Image: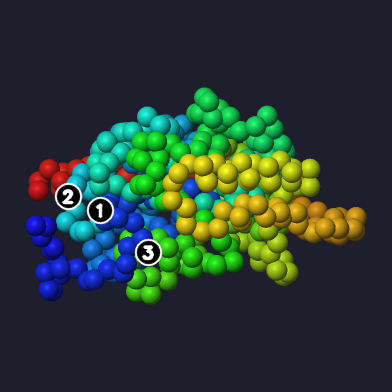
């Protein structure tokens, strides 16, 4: 008989009715841009309540991504290195050690796992104790968010150019991982993600939740039911995290990326310097209600055809689907039906002005050092040396902290 530790009466609180058989290892596998961060932040913020209900959210942070990347063979951006498999083994040890009635594992990077990685995940976590949950949204809504995500890493192609590159010639999966396009569809062909997991885990052990933007609580309520939680008890409301950019923000960031590259900015410094300067700043430059990035007119039919392909694939996969797959059949958002030349010019002026302002701030504060003289700006030849010195001091500090942690572990 399992011992329940940390409960006044010796047993956890009575859970809400469960939506799946009583497996005790639930793995949330994404998909990307389908509300994963919101779920992870909610669970992390309400760890105390989860533990009271007998649910252990594995890890000690909002999103423990390195184990997922390690076992799925996903390389870290910029440094182009896959985390060591020891990260995944650390996660499995924590799962094995929990005394709660249920272990909850979460990362959208599990959607990127090829079949051989899924086989290892299922083997290491014990197939007979597992259930996988995949949250999806209509692809017409996630494509703009996916493009915006790579903008945050310095991408310089417009949404229209990116879409044309990624949806032309179909959606290759036969050699997943060989190109960016193939890696993209490995995790965004939701029907194929569900199929890969169902082939290894069994279709009766895979649940797909279809998110509906018009019913915001649906995903949390449904997932809570699967976990045996009462969503009303998750009272700690986390701040909004990783929100999609508005159309204006995305276009400004695209222009900033282009200027940053033209002026000789390095990709390795981009995330910690450029994105932090940009984040939370641009929306203050406009007063109207934010407009989301629409699907370009020339790509609408291709996107709608892809959306139907995914919905039909999910229906045929044999997995359990909770929610309305007909949402995938709705027309893609085309934005404003008509816009005058004057309005286009006004929008372009606003984007250009905001981007130029941000680039000017980066230059005057030393974040960006242009590779050629610019009118009105001077280049500080000692700044680069000071930046290198600061980075070295930070590296030494990090090494010392890591060594101290290792010593403390050995002394236990």
Give the foreground label among 2 and 1.
1
Q: CA distance from mark 2 to mark 1?
A: 13 Å
The label on residue 405 is none
Q: Count the numbered circles shown.
A: 3
Crowding at mark 1 (Cα within 10 Å: few <14, some 14-19, many 20+): some
Picture residue at 51% right of the left edge, 28% below the top = 176
Q: Is residue 367 left or right of residue 296?
A: left
Q: Is residue 48 in sight in this rendering?
A: no
Percent of width and height locating residue 328: 62, 52
**Kind of element beneath mark 1:** loop
* Residue holding disc 2: 97
* Residue holding disc 1: 24
Closest to the observer, 226 or 412: 226
* Residue holding disc 3: 224
Percent of width and height locating residue 253: 66, 50
Q: Residue furthest right?
A: 341
Percent of width and height locating residue 140: 65, 50
59 w.r.t. 227: above or below:
above
Percent of width and height locating residue 240: 50, 65
């Amino acid at each position: 008989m399992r011992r329940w530790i940390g409960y006044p009466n010796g047993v956890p609180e009575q859970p809400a009715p469960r939506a799946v058989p009583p497996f005790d290892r639930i793995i949330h596998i994404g998909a990307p841009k389908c509300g994963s961060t919101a779920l992870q932040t909610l669970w992390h913020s309400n760890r105390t309540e989860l533990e009271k209900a007998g649910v252990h959210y594995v890890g000690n942070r909002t999103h423990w991504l390195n184990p997922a990347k390690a076992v799925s063979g996903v390389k870290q951006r910029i440094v182009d290195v896959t985390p060591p498999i020891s990260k995944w083994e650390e996660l499995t040890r924590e799962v094995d050690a929990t005394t709660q009635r249920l272990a909850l594992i979460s990362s959208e990077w599990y959607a990127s796992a090829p079949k051989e990685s899924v086989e290892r995940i299922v083997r290491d976590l014990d197939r007979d104790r597992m259930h996988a949950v995949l949250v999806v949204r209509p692809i017409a809504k996630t494509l703009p968010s996916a493009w915006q995500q790579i903008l945050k890493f310095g991408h310089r192609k417009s949404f229209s150019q990116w879409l044309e590159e990624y949806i032309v010639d179909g959606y290759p999966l036969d050699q997943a991982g060989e190109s960016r396009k193939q890696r993209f569809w490995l995790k965004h062909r939701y029907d194929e993600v569900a199929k890969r997991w169902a082939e290894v885990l069994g279709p009766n052990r895979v649940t797909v939740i279809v998110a509906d933007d018009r019913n915001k609580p649906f995903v949390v309520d449904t997932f809570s039911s699967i976990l045996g939680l009462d969503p009303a008890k998750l009272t700690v409301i986390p701040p909004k995290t990783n929100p999609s950019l508005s159309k204006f923000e995305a276009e400004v960031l695209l222009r900033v990326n282009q200027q940053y590259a033209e002026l000789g900015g390095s990709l390795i410094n981009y995330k910690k310097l450029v994105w932090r300067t940009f984040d939370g700043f641009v929306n203050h430059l406009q007063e109207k209600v934010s407009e989301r990035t629409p699907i370009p007119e020339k790509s609408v039919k291709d996107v709608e055809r892809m959306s139907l392909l995914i919905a039909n694939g999910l229906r045929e996969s044999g997995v359990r689907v909770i929610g309305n797959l007909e949402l995938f059949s709705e027309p893609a958002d085309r934005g404003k039906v008509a816009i005058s030349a004057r309005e286009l010019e006004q929008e372009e002026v606003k984007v250009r002005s905001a981007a130029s302002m941000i680039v000017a701030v980066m230059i005057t504060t030393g974040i960006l050092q242009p590779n050629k003289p610019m009118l009105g700006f001077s280049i500080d030849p000692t700044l680069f040396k000071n930046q290198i010195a600061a980075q070295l001091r930070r590296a030494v500090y990090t090494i010392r902290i890591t060594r101290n942690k290792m010593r403390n572990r050995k002394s236990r």
